[in-house]
Image (spheres, grey):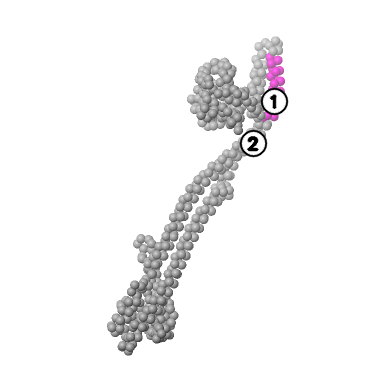
Amino acid sequence: MTLWRPDFSSIKQRFWSRSSSGEGLLPFELVKYFAVTSLALIFFASLLLSWILANNAKQVLLKRSEAYSQLFAENLNSQVFLQFVLPTVVRYGRIALSDERQFARLDGIVRNITRGMRIESVTIFDSRENIISYSTMKEMVGKKNMGGLEYEKARKGTDSSILVSSGSLLSLLPGAPPVYCTLKSYVPFRQEDRTGERSGDIMGVIEVVQDLSGDLRAIIGLQGRIILLSFTIMGILFAVLSVIVVRANKIMADRARERVLLEEKLGEAQRLATLGKMVAAVSHEIKNPLGIVRSTAEILGKRITKVAPGNEHLAAIIVEETTRLDNIVREFLDFARPRDLSLQPESLNVLVERLVRFMEPELEKKDIDLVQHLDPNLKTVDMDGEQIYQVLFNMVFNSIQAMADGGTLSISTVNRPETGEVMLTVTDTGIGMEEEKTAQIFTPFFTDKNRGTGLGLAIAKNIVDKHHGRIEVESRQGEGSTFRIILPDDFASVAV
């Protein structure tokens, strides 16, 4: 009979392939991508913010410096007109800066006005032609066509400014060219009336040059600090997020594997449940006819002895095989329909002694030495004695089968007060088992024997599980095996 078994390997493959392709992303994967994207957006937003702040600071600096230059130029216009133009016209009849005395007087007035102020240079252009009549930088005096478009605007009565600068974030790097920033403001040099009001007559153009390199360096430094701070914060957030994501992904992957294992166990349970129902039904139908066959064979055996002496073994064979089949049917029924527990306080020592009396002839027959170490103070525990006896019988029977050429069978019991348990140990010096086989011996229908259902140890484990205990096994091929049955000494507290 071939039973359907779900292909869990294909389920695993579909599950993991969906996860890796993105079709079935784990919930935390979306969080991870969202968080990384958010970090990137925050970083670029920080860069944009730093640029906006730097640009705004430059605009504020430019407007403030322009206002400062215009105010300075107006004051310079008034002071030069009152202290130089009028006295010079009165004294000399005209202004001629080629005269060293007039130039020195004007230079003294201008330098007194600019002393202590953030002014790099002051230049006065002639109003009739683009020529420098005066400059605090004497090498510039007399040069033509140095004014440019801004000079033309000022000559027509319009104030104007031009910002000349070079420098960026790269200027913060070692070996980069220095930051340079200069604001040139052009203001008409007008005449003034007796009340000090400036009239419409333009006598020339005043150029005021301010060095704003320090301010620009401060702005670029602020921009760099904002970006560095953004990098630092993003780095810390990314490191924290990476740790969280790695740990969370590990947890989610573990849960995903657990889910697949649970699906496997669920499918296995469903398969075994279906198989159990079928086995129970078939075994029930076989049991009665099998009993009739056995009884009939026993009667035939008695009659054959009288009618045909010497052929009694034929009936004995029928009885033997029907007995074996009856045992198999009983195992199937025990597995398919587990019996309810009938709990009574009992000692494992009593069950061991009972089993030893029953198995003694078989031990002598197999040339197996029995060694017992039973704790005389072993606690009694609530158990179903008959079912635990069945478990113990399976353990000892398997050990006897593993020692076909004889050996030593050790049975011991002990209290474990530190865990509130009692433990029974069965050790043999038989052929042992491989690690792969050890992991499967409690699987229903698993057996490497020519005869047997593979249900004995599975039934034993089910019985121990119902007692809230556990079975442990250790085995080495060629050295023997050790089985441990561990039961709680207080069934009621464990059950709660």
Name the kind of residue labelled 1 in the image. Answer: Ile
Comparing marks 1 and 2, which lies closer to the viewer? 2
Q: Main secondary structure of the magenta part?
A: helix
Q: Is residue 263 left or right of residue 407?
A: right
Q: Which residue is mark 2?
A: 270
Q: What label does residue 496 carry, if any?
A: none
Q: Could one spot residue 52 in this view of the protein?
A: yes
Q: Residues within 10 Å of mark 2 (few under 14, many from 20)?
A: few
Secondary structure of residue under mark 2 = helix
Residue drawn at 57 percent across, 22 percent down: 347
Give the residue at the far front of this rendering.
Answer: 195
Residue 109, how many percent across, how many down? 32, 79
Residue 215, how many percent across, how many down? 39, 67
Residue drawn at 60 percent across, 37 percent down: 265
**Real-space Cα separation, disc 1 to disc 2, in angstroms:** 24 Å
Q: Residues within 10 Å of mark 1 (few under 14, many from 20)?
A: some
Residue stretch rendered in magenta on the structure: 279-301
Residue 477, how many percent across, how many down? 49, 27
Q: In this orientation, which residue lies closer to the viewer: 109 or 132? A: 109
Q: Which residue is mark 1?
A: 286
Name the kind of residue labelled 2 in the image. Answer: Gln
